[in-house]
Image (cartoon, rainbow, N blue to C red):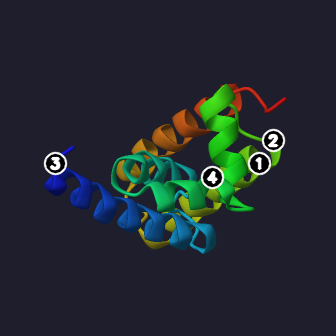
């Protein structure tokens, strides 16, 4: 693998890790998709970061469940859907553009449906 690809992957891994960490505390910013991107780029840019992610007490289980089973824990699904609802309500209160809110509602419902159709870890 070229040095440019390795360094680009490492930079992107840290960018997505930062977004995942922000997503833990900021409603509306997803954590798991950014975490999955972090793991993907870390595998190409830093073995050390990749190992750290999978050994992390919080992030590791999410990554392993997803990688091995395509599974999402029920608690994670509930929190994600609750945050989608809260995010939509905040945007409705702040934005209020009917067509945009309808489009966001459809998008959020599609994301919620995807989450609920994923199996739960064994």
First in sequence, mark 3 or 2: give its number.
Answer: 3
Distance from disc 3 to disc 1, alpha carbons, whole Å, reads 41 Å
Identify which residue, 92 or 41, lies in the foreground. 41
Tag 3 and tag 4, C-beta contact below 8 Å: no
Where residue 112 appears, as percent x and y from the top left, is 62, 38
Residue 72 quadrant: top right
Tag 2 and tag 4, C-beta contact below 8 Å: no
Distance from disc 3 to disc 2, alpha carbons, whole Å, reads 40 Å
First in sequence, mark 3 or 4: give its number.
Answer: 3
Q: Residues within 10 Å of mark 4 (few under 14, many from 20)?
A: some
First in sequence, mark 2 or 4: give its number.
Answer: 4
Tag 4 and tag 1, C-beta contact below 8 Å: no
Where residue 76 appears, as percent x and y from the top left, is 74, 49
Q: In which quadrant is the N terminus drawn?
A: top left
Q: How crowded is mark 2: few (under 14 residues within 10 Å), some or many (20 or more)?
A: some
| Residue 2, disc | 3
Going by the image, does 8 lie left or right of 100? left
Question: Total of numbered circles in the picture?
Answer: 4
Q: For numbered disc 2, what is the local secondary structure?
A: helix
- Look at mark 2 in the image and give the residue it sits on: 74
- Look at mark 4 in the image and give the residue it sits on: 54
Where residue 97 appears, as percent x and y from the top left, is 37, 59
Tag 2 and tag 1, C-beta contact below 8 Å: yes
Q: For numbered disc 1, what is the local secondary structure?
A: helix
Q: For numbered disc 4, what is the local secondary structure?
A: helix
Marks 3, 2: nearer the viewer: 3
Q: For numbered disc 3, what is the local secondary structure?
A: loop
Marks 2, 1: nearer the viewer: 2
Q: In which quadrant is the C terminus drawn?
A: top right
Distance from disc 2 to disc 4, alpha carbons, whole Å, reads 20 Å
- Look at mark 1 in the image and give the residue it sits on: 78
């Amino acid at each position: 693998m070229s040095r440019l690809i390795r360094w680009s992957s490492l930079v992107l891994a840290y960018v997505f890790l930062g977004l995942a960490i922000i997503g833990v505390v900021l409603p509306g910013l997803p954590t798991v998709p950014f975490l999955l991107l972090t793991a993907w780029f870390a595998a190409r840019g830093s073995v050390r970061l990749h190992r750290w992610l999978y050994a992390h007490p919080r992030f590791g289980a999410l990554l392993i469940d997803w990688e091995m089973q395509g599974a999402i824990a029920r608690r994670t699904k509930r929190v994600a859907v609750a945050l989608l609802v809260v995010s939509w309500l905040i945007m409705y209160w702040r934005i209020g553009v009917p067509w945009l809110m309808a489009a966001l509602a459809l998008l959020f419902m599609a994301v919620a449906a995807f989450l609920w159709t994923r199996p739960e870890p064994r």
